Amino acid sequence: MTQMNPYYSELQGSYLFSEIAKRRTKFVQENPNAEIISLGIGDVTRGLPEAIVKAMHAAVDELAQPETFRGYGPEQGYDFLIQAIIENDYKARGIDIQSNEVFLSDGSKCDVGNIQEIFSQDSIVAVQDPVYPVYVDTNVMAGRSGKFNSETNRYENIEYLDCTAENNFKPSLPKRKVDIIYLCYPNNPTGMTLSKAELKKWVDYAKENNCIILYDSAYEAFITESDVPRSIYEIEGAKEVAIEFRSFSKTAGFTGVRCAYTVVPRELKGFDKDGKELLVNDLWNRRHTTKFNGVSYVTQRGAAAVYSPEGKEQIKALVDFYMTNARIIRDGLASIGIEVFGGVNAPYIWLKTPNGMDSWAFFDKLLSEANIVGTPGVGFGQSGQGYFRLTAFGTRENTEKAVERIRNMSL
Amino acid sequence: MTQMNPYYSELQGSYLFSEIAKRRTKFVQENPNAEIISLGIGDVTRGLPEAIVKAMHAAVDELAQPETFRGYGPEQGYDFLIQAIIENDYKARGIDIQSNEVFLSDGSKCDVGNIQEIFSQDSIVAVQDPVYPVYVDTNVMAGRSGKFNSETNRYENIEYLDCTAENNFKPSLPKRKVDIIYLCYPNNPTGMTLSKAELKKWVDYAKENNCIILYDSAYEAFITESDVPRSIYEIEGAKEVAIEFRSFSKTAGFTGVRCAYTVVPRELKGFDKDGKELLVNDLWNRRHTTKFNGVSYVTQRGAAAVYSPEGKEQIKALVDFYMTNARIIRDGLASIGIEVFGGVNAPYIWLKTPNGMDSWAFFDKLLSEANIVGTPGVGFGQSGQGYFRLTAFGTRENTEKAVERIRNMSL
């Protein structure tokens, strides 16, 4: 008998988005003429910027001719893209990153999902709550979570760091010794950020307590405020404690094109079971080259165009477009007394449901009365109960229409 | 202290290709005028077929406009490609595969590397020897290999199935109880195949002994002989015991474009620790949707064009081109008395080194006397000692020149 990984049975169903789809489908069947607007899923809707389109066409043409054809590239990514990343995302902000510290991949979901493999199975993991489910689920699969407690709605062996309006969505430091801390800023789902001073607390904590921060910075491009760090490496000493994940998905509209990167500094050390120091970079490099075969050449050329003068301008226009949507939602909701968070440095608006409704009750009300689909906060964790996420990725017309409909609801 | 995965320290260095590069570099430094021909790495060299180029351009244009833009696709792949695969690769050969049994990915290396995650850690793994190193290394990382024995050059807890000229590269059934068997046909590196009757023995064995076959069929497109199964599912009952891996990499020149797929039949069962049956498909689906975010849309459109009438014709021409190279190498080497294997249903020629030289000695001789880089067989495992791999992926001119040079060597 071939036995399967026993930890998979500890996974909870991917309840959130299937339940949303189920309720939406039921509503549409019963109300076939309702014009539904989705501000639920975090997917972009604008076309790819022209500079990227041009670069991708050129790359396809290169692949068509034996003289310019490229087969297997380096698993870590082509140097033309790695250098552009280092120059623009780091050096321009005074951060020194070497080319062997950058690993290109086909998505941050893959990287944040795979990274846990290089740590020992008995590592204690801390996550923010609410949280992007991939951090938790991949650790469940690896056997780090313990049992799921259906009363607390949490895994017994995971340390949850509550983020609610009470602490302005800035979690307290872990109460017990942990080994790995997932932080996501700008945060999905809350859209909130940390200042440099606040992030420094985490870096200092990680140093003092010998733990590693996995810093998911997929929404960095949406930061508008100047005191908000764009990279954890803006904090002194962070290269000794943090891995950073970045993505082209939302920045450049790459959700269907697939490109991201992960920075693993050579200063970052882990330990083997005898207490001997190991370079985390070496382990990730081994993992990446053994189980991954590089990002599509066409995609990498498209990503490099993000850093061209025209690319930068077009990306800025794209981000501005979505952030204007965010402002429209924020202002519209605030004007009728709804408490809103996020939406300033992130394309997510996190709102406190009116009158203390629970997240799913508000979902149903929004769907039935305004024909809008959003995401119940409790789907991201117990601390999301009583909150709700709207995204700024819709068209302008739909975003304005959605806000108008909410303003006309009886709340 | 954050402890790292302890099993990574059991990995042996990725010795093979770095050692090849080192010896090549040294030779070039000492012989700057030597015109080196590489028949070493298994990478294609021709341009992408026209039908694919056209489809990729069209897909890039779709992504440029909001009206036709596509963001996140299904993690398992778009239906247009899954249906084309089912129709052409399976239904056309009388095999019934459902759409929820096909999982698209960005490469077979990733899939054959990741698949072991869904099995329990104490599964006993059998591999052919010589073998594609990813099968072994990913199980080492997961803690299934036991210690490496530097005298036998093997891991203590892996079952190695010898493939040598003595058994015509057809391994015996495992001598002890195993749970997972990796089979690769057409084989990399030997280029050899099994007949339907021979493959049936393995399917029957897996059924009788409750084990699962991981069938890597990445080189299926190169099969020319009629009795050679193109899919393990041509064997009755195989859907109950086998997962199949296929790739567009060599078939369509996608090594830099990145597309592959894995078939996990719903008939395939594993067991939980209490002996309860589980659908392997459910576990893989959960793994795939949690840690992967779909193949680039542009790539998927390119892959679908492989199945268009023009695409099929152009792919055939591409495969024929490489297989003509294979014949040139086979015939040329055989004509001077070198014992050659493979190259009939696979783009790899596996040769017995003349006069019983060891693999690396022959590498050095070939490099210094003929300025040709190939791959020492022992790099794929202990049973590859005394063998050598040449690939058919070069240009016609280089292939012919290489053969001529070998014919002129004193062997």
Image: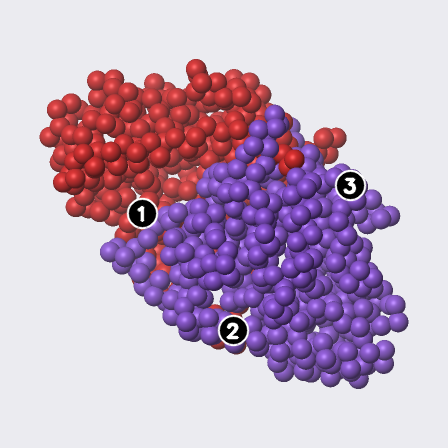
Chain colours: A red, B purple
Estimate the x, y position of residue B408 in percent, counting from the top left.
80, 84
Indicate the position of residue A86 as horizontal and vertical percent values.
49, 52
Tags 2 and 3 both on a single chain = yes
Labels 2 and 3 touching (C-beta < 8 A): no
Residue in the picture at 54% in, 62% down: B249
Q: Chain of mark 1?
A: A
Residue A207 appearing in the image: no
Of marks 3 and 1, the one in the foreground: 3
The disc at residue B176 is 3
Q: Which residue is mark 2?
A: B316
CB-based contact (under 8 Å), mark 1 and mark 2: no
Residues B407 and B236: in front is B236
C-alpha separation, residue under disc 3 versus residue under disc 1 = 53 Å
Q: Tell me if residue B115 comes above or below residue B380 in the rendering.
A: above
Would you place residue A31 above or below residue B230 in this image? above
Numbered-mark total: 3
| Residue depth check, mark 2 versus mark 3: number of the one nearer the observer | 3
Residue drawn at (82%, 69%) of the image: B353
Label 3 sits on a secondary structure element that is loop
Q: Secondary structure at mark 1?
A: loop
Return the residue found at the far right.
Answer: B355
Q: Amino acid at mark 2?
A: Lys
Of callouts 2 and 3, the N-terminal one: 3
Task: Sort mark 1 into few (<14), some (14-19) or many (20+) by Cα contacts within 10 Å.
Answer: many
Quadrant that contains the N terminus of chain A = top right
Q: Amino acid at mark 3?
A: Arg
Instruction: Tell me which corner region of the image, top left, top right, bottom left or bottom right, holds residue A338.
Output: top left
What residue is disc 1 on? A44
Residue that appears at 68% across and 76% down: B37
Identify which residue, A355 or A4, lies in the foreground: A4
